[in-house]
Amino acid sequence: MEQFNILLVDDEEAMHRLLSLFMARAGYRCNLHSAYNGKTGVEMYNKLLESGKRPHIVLMDLRMPGMDGVEATEKILEIDPDADIYLFTAYAKTEIEKEALKHGAKGTINKTADWNKMVERIVDILRSKVDRSHK
C-alpha cells in the first residue's frame, strides 16, 4: 500500500485529527504533518523538503491568523515551484480562493460535512500523482 506524505496547514485542530482518522478508516496510510498557521506551514514544508520527505500534497486553509493561505502558498511555491498545493477551505468561490489560485494553488477541496467525499477527492489527487510519476 502506498504511503502518502501530507502537509495540512489549518488553524482548526479538529481538522488534523479528522483527516488522519478518515484517511485511516478509508484504508490509506499517510504521514500527516500538521501546521496550525501559514508561517509554520512554510517552515515545515522547507524542513520536510530538506529532509527528503517532500509532501505529496499540501492542504492549505485560506483563513488563518497571522499568515493566511494565500501568502503561505506563495512562499511555499518560492521554495519549491513544483509543490502541489490544494486549498482546503469552506471559502470556495470567493475572492480569497481566486487570489490563492492565481498565486499557484492547483485546485480546491471544499470542506464539507462529508469527510468521506473529502478523503475520496484527496486520494484521487494523490493517485493521479502516483500514476503520473510511474509513466
Image: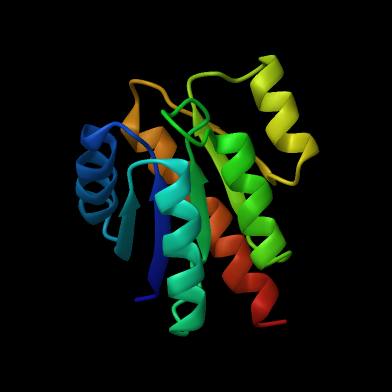
* Picture coordinates of residue 118, whole percent (x, y): 42, 36
Against 95, residue 45 (above or below) is below
Give left or right: position of 51 versus 101.
left
Nearest the eye: 50 or 57 = 50
Nearest the eye: 10 or 86 = 10
Say which quadrant the C terminus sits in.
Answer: bottom right
Nearest the eye: 120 or 87 = 87
Say which quadrant the N terminus sits in.
Answer: bottom left
Residue at image position (45%, 61%) is 43
Task: Report whether residue 39 is seen.
Answer: yes
* Picture coordinates of residue 89, whole percent (x, y): 49, 28
Task: Report whether residue 123 is seen.
Answer: no
Against 105, residue 43 (above or below) is below
Extreme-front residue of the structure: 66
* Picture coordinates of residue 85, whole percent (x, y): 60, 51
Extreme-right residue of the structure: 102
Residue at image position (66%, 78%) is 133
Q: How many numbered marks does the figure carry?
A: 0
Nearest the eye: 5 or 50 = 50
* Picture coordinates of residue 125, whole percent (x, y): 57, 54
Against 75, residue 51 (above or below) is below
Give left or right: position of 39 versus 132.
left
Q: Determine which quarter of the picture holds residue 31.
A: bottom left
User: Which colouring convention does the figure follow?
Assistant: rainbow
Give left or right: position of 48 versus 23.
right
Residue at image position (69%, 34%) is 100
Give left or right: position of 122 versus 29.
right
Residue at image position (44%, 78%) is 53
Against 47, residue 120 (above or below) is above
